[in-house]
Image: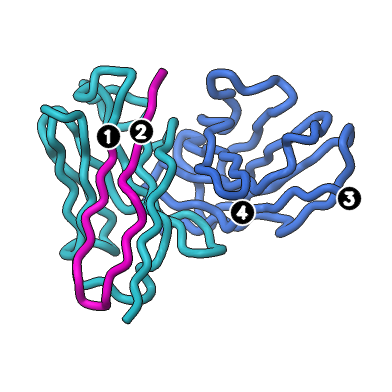
Amino acid sequence: QVHLVQSGAEVKEPGASVKVSCRASGYTFTTYYIHWVRQAPGQGLEWMGLINPSGGSTTYSQKFRGRVTMTRDSSTSAVYLELSSLRSEDTAVYYCARDLGVVLAPANNYFDPWGQGTLVTVSS
Amino acid sequence: EIVLTQSPGTLSLSPGERATLSCWASQSVSSSYLAWYQQKPGQAPRLLIYGASSRATGIPDRFSGSGSGTDFTLTISRLEPEDFAVYYCQQYGSSPYTFGQGTKLEIK
């Protein structure tokens, strides 16, 4: 069974950086794209970008370009989201989610399954 | 960026009733690249529908999707108690891939 398991909650001060991990199991890690989506408290969903775990190539939403870095570690089947220059508006639950498409083709860009989410709180 | 608007914001129905949720796009969604997700409190979203009308694996056939262009609909034919949740539409035809603000389906 496919599982995405994320790291625990984080509290950061404004201006700091945060790194969230997402470990995949139940399938061949390098086969499927992984996306990151966030959800502010009581709000909707916002797509941040994706990573190809096979070669490490990334595509970021223009909104986050310059502040976001997505990486992967194939030896541990994990992907990472790093967000820098944090501000209060970045307080949200951050989800990793697997693409339905394989990396031999363009990403499908819809998502299933999802990780359990990681709450990042930005507060002084 | 394509803006998705969902209606209604909240829908109050009873188990056994039919639910119709709408999603309008600010511009045409190419190739009907429209998905629907269900989210329950404290849980991650779950994919229900992709390609506007294709059910994801394991999704009961009481869930159906339709529409094209700018107008899309999710229908739940007969509500079960476990269907009361928040539903989001998502377009994936044009980056950035955007979501609607959600429709909360609550028990009447």
Q: SS class of the residue under badge 1? A: strand
Type of amino acid at the residue the image marks with label 2: Leu
Q: Nearer the viewer, mark 3 or mark 1?
A: 1
x, y percentage for residue A28?
Answer: 24, 18
Please name the color used to draw chain B: blue
Task: Determine which residue is flagged by label 4.
Answer: B102
Instruction: Single out the mark in the foreground, 2 or 4.
Output: 2
Badge 2 vs badge 1, beta-carbon distance below 8 Å:
yes
| Image quadrant in which you'd find residue A52 | top left
Q: Which mark is residue B108?
A: 3
Q: Is residue B38 magenta?
A: no
Residue at (30%, 18%) from the top-left corner? A27
Residue A108 in the image: state x and y as whole percent: 36, 31
Q: Closer to the N terminus: mark 2 or mark 1?
A: 2
In the displayed structure image, the side of residue B71 where residue A38 appears, left or right: left
Q: CA distance from mark 3 to mark 4?
A: 18 Å
Element type where label 4 sits in the image: loop
Labels 2, 4: one chain: no
Same chain under badges 2 and 1? The reply is: yes
Name the residue that disc number 2 marks: A4
Q: Which residues are magenta?
A: A1-22
3 or 4: mark nearer the eye:
3
If the image is split into quadrants, where does the C terminus of chain A sit?
A: bottom left
Q: Secondary structure at mark 2?
A: strand
Q: Amino acid at mark 4?
A: Gly
**Disc 1 chain ID:** A
Q: Nearer the viewer, mark 4 or mark 1?
A: 1
The residue indicated by pointer 1 is A23
- SS of the residue at dot 3? loop
